[in-house]
Image (cartoon, grey):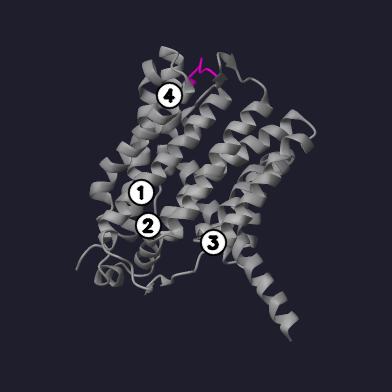
Amino acid sequence: MDDVMTRPATGATAAGPRRKPAAGGLTRDHATLGAVWILLAAFPFVAGNEFVVSLGIMFCINLILIASLNTIMGFCGQISLSHGAFYGLGAYTSGTLSAKLAVEPWIGIPLGMAVAALSAVVIGLPALRLRGHYLAMATLGFNAIVFVLFNELVGLTGGPNGLLGVGPFSLAGNALFALESMYWVVWVAAGLVMLAILNLIRSRVGRALRALATSEIGADALGVNVFRYKLVVFVLTAAMAGLAGGLYVHYNQFASPETFGFFTSVMLVVMVALGGWGRYWGPLFGALIFTVVPELLRSFGDLELFLFGLSMILVMLFMPGGVAGGLEALAGRFKRGGRS
């Protein structure tokens, strides 16, 4: 059969019927996204202090990470444990160029995204032919290799001591040291990523992704080039993770291998599940949990990790569809109650 990428889509696929967009191709989700981003634009003005603004910056960076991972796992159905590695490749590429060659972040970050995307091609070509836990193990192995390289390439990465001397963002030659200025950079980046993902999942390609997430055999029978779709989305989401890494390193002006290790990849998978696996708004809640909850639990000292794990178990027990799924179910009950 012809590839779905190269032939007109039918009125419905295994991923469900086509939703009629609003005028101009906009949907209700586009309007909601615009409203949410307008609200987030007010955050620096009501934050109260620089610490809260810094949490807002990390929320936007974490949102890029979790939203990109949700795209490959939630919408495409592929278990990836290498997102921490792509995050680190973006950070170390841009950070090293800045520290060693004084390359501006506006140039370094796209290069970091390109390195992350290229590495995704290298690992994706063999790994994406695997399925289930075999794919998870292959991507986990890649994450381990990259983590070792971050530690051993001391001349480039600084090794276990971390990468020092990374420059901040600058505009017209003026460094953007103020947290409010950095917030606008990550606010724009996160908004563009969320818009790109929304357009992707509402497109013909998005319907094909949901089809192969449901059944790769069924999607292949419908003419979807399963491997090509998986590879394209894997590379795209790796580039998004590289973007998050570049933003992180120039905000923090430092990078350490521990930030991009196996634990980070696992936690990102957990946040995808907690936010709402395969739900567009799930990453918003996952990023909020990932950013805020550890800070709230920090005062508990050694009990922090235990309480964090307990809270995650409780969420999954009472809201198996994640926070976004729980809110959808609650809204559905209210609607049914109103009709009755």
Q: Which residue is mark 3?
A: 23
Graded by Cα atoms within 10 Å as few (under 14), some (14 to 19) or many (20 or more), the crowding at tag 1 reads many
Q: Please give left or right for residue 197 compared with residue 294 in the image.
A: left
Q: Which residue is mark 1?
A: 234
Q: Please give left or right for residue 32 compared with residue 337 in the image.
A: left
- Real-space CA distance between mark 4 and mark 2, rounded to the nearest whole angstrom: 31 Å
Graded by Cα atoms within 10 Å as few (under 14), some (14 to 19) or many (20 or more), the crowding at tag 2 reads many
In the rendered view, would you say 70 is above or below 98? below
As shown in the figure, which amino acid type bears the numbered disc 4?
Ile
Dot 1 or dot 3: first in sequence order is 3
Residue 27 position in % (x across, y down): 55, 61
**Quarter assignment of residue 147:** top left
Q: Which residue is mark 4?
A: 107
- Real-space CA distance between mark 3 and mark 4, rounded to the nearest whole angstrom: 37 Å
Q: Which residue is mark 2?
A: 78
**Cβ atoms at labels 4 and 2 below 8 Å apart:** no
As shown in the figure, which amino acid type bears the numbered disc 2?
Gln
- Real-space CA distance between mark 1 and mark 2, rounded to the nearest whole angstrom: 9 Å
Residue sitting at x 24%, y 55%: 129
Q: Quadrant of the N terminus?
A: bottom left
